[in-house]
Amino acid sequence: MKKRKTILDIAGMKNSGEKISVLTAYDYPFAQLMDQAGIDVILVGDSVGSVFSGYENTLPVTLEEMIYHTRPVIRATEQALIVTDMPFMSYQVDLSDARRNAGRLIKEASAQAVKLEGGENLAETIAAITAIDIPVMAHIGLTPQSIHRMGGFKVQGRQDAQAEQIMADARAVEDAGAFAVVLEGIPARLAAQVSQELSIPTIGIGAGVDCDGQVLVIHDILGLCDKYSPKFVKRFADVRQTISEGISSYINEVKTGVFPGEEHSFK
Ligand code: KIV
């Protein structure tokens, strides 16, 4: 039995200069494959709404769905740190709601930490959750739950005022007790400055190479989705084609009576 990583191991990786690898997973088989390959952190992201449930964005995802998707990820893994996203409206209403919902992800789903989107504006919430010993990963820059404020998925921090706000957000989440922060969709130079200034690890997505770690959505790196793929995604495999060919072959063999063969039948 391998020892599961903790937030202390992740902090130690920043200190030793080892890059932190993070991928999203929402089910048993993908989580098991990632864990066996040695991924450091698995994020049960609310991107599940887009790539699994087929919603237009992450806003409809519920806490119950996050609990449901975290459980198989926990069962499938032995060594990765498991972080689960707090979905939209599970932490914004008030602090007791935020604490209770973060607690449900730990108690009912067995996540080791939660992630929430927001900087200075959510510092009090991060402090309230960390005060009851639930580790929080923050998420700043392009925050998908703020899609309506941002007017779409747009790079954040290109103008000076926005860049200053992102730096202030980064300092605020560290001061509030976050153990790591996701930097999404910001210029690489700004992400490098944030990573240099903070003592907690930064995990980049569309934020350049100088972050302390990188995160991507598993469906994006495997080419599983037919949706638009952003510039920051690198496709490491194209399994959509392989799956599609397998399904077509099955249909064809059923229609033509080739499958099942004698070797698949009982005497
Ligand atoms: O929901 C998600 O998958 C995320 C990552 C892409 C950072 O928040």
Image: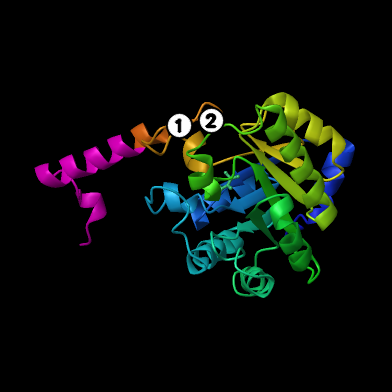
Residue sitting at the far front: 161
- Mark 2: C-beta under 8 Å from nearest atom of ligand 1: no
In the image, 259 versus 203, the foreground residue is 203
From where the camera sits, is residue 79 visible?
A: no
Q: Give the range drawn in magenta.
A: 243-267
Q: In this view, does 105 lie to the left or right of 124?
A: left
Q: What residue type is labelled 1?
A: Ser
Q: Element type at marker 2?
A: loop
Mark 1 packing: few (<14 Cα in 10 Å), some, or many (20+)?
few
Residue at point 51% right, 55% down? 26
On whether residue 255 falls in the magenta region, the answer is yes
Residue sitting at the far left: 256
Q: Where is residue 105 in the image (x, y as percent from the top left)?
A: 62, 68
| Placement of 14 over or under 35, stated as above or below | above
To which residue does mark 2 refer? 233
Q: Is the magenta stretch mostly helix, strand or loop?
A: helix
Q: Position of residue 41 (x, y in %)?
A: 68, 49
Q: In this view, does 27 lie to the left or right of 175?
A: left
To which residue does mark 1 refer? 229
Q: Where is residue 90 in the image (x, y as percent from the top left)?
A: 57, 66
| Placement of 100 over or under 188, stated as above or below | below
From where the camera sits, is residue 260 visible?
A: yes
Residue at point 64% right, 70% down? 94
Q: In which quarter of the image is residue 211?
A: top right
| Placement of 58 over or under 90, stated as above or below | above
Q: In which quadrant will I find the C terminus?
A: bottom left
Q: In which quarter of the image is residue 70?
A: bottom right
- Measured Cα–Cα span from mark 1 to mark 2: 7 Å
Q: Which amino acid does label 2 sit on?
A: Val
